[in-house]
Image (cartoon, rainbow, N blue to C red):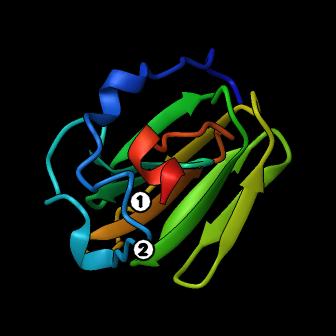
Amino acid sequence: MARKPFNMSPKAFGPAEADPNANVSVFSADDAPTPRTGTPPAISRKLEGDGANLIFLTFSPGQVLRSHTTAHPITIQTLKGALVLNTDEGEIPLEPGTVVHLRAMVVHEVSAPEDAAEENVLLLTMLTGERHATKETEQE
């Protein structure tokens, strides 16, 4: 990857929208943020739960989340549309049903091709290993 990677601040994802103490949380591509123009794509943190953060990104055609790294291992899953993941190991087409695991600090970039659908939804799961349970839920 030619460009120097950047690291997004956790604040860029916004606060989590779901209750981290819920026993079950269900999300779908319909929960993704509305597409936006410019860079970066629309981003919304849906859950900051035990062990993982669930973050939805919606890309418009031609939009790029430029080269960056993450502090935690992640999985990337396309829920809707078509995207492309680039790493030092090559280009990976991302279509619904494709899941990719990246170790922490792997430089990567995600983009939506110019001829992609109007909404291309990616589910990013940050595998943090952190506990978020409150004292009340631990006693139940």
In the structure shown, which secondary structural element does the residue marked by tag 2 occupy?
A: loop
Bin the neighbour count of mark 1 within 10 Å (Cα to Cα): few under 14, some 14-19, many 20 and up: many
Residue 74: horizontal and vertical position, in percent?
66, 48
Relative to residue 23, is residue 14 depicted above or below?
A: above
Residue 24: horizontal and vertical position, in percent?
42, 74
Residue 59: horizontal and vertical position, in percent?
31, 57
Marks 2/1: CA distance?
31 Å
Looking at the picture, tell me which residue is in the foreground, 50 or 6.
50
What residue lies at 35% left-to-right and 71% top-to-bottom?
A: 115
- The residue most toward the front is 139
- The residue most toward the bottom is 97
Task: Note whether residue 45 is visible.
Answer: yes
In this figure, which residue is indicated by the disc labeled 2?
24
Left or right of residue 80, residue 41 in this image: left
Residue 112, disc: 1
Q: Amino acid at mark 2?
A: Val
What residue lies at 36% left-to-right and 67% top-to-bottom?
A: 121
What residue lies at 44% left-to-right and 63% top-to-bottom?
A: 122
What residue lies at 32% left-to-right and 23% top-to-bottom?
A: 11
Q: Quadrant of residue 109?
A: top right
Residue 74, disc: none
Looking at the picture, tell me which residue is in the foreground, 92 or 115.
92
Residue 131: horizontal and vertical position, in percent?
58, 39
Q: Amino acid at mark 1?
A: Ala
Q: Quadrant of residue 22?
A: bottom left
Relative to residue 1, is residue 23 depicted above or below?
A: below
Image quarter of the N terminus: top right
Left or right of residue 76, residue 42 in this image: left
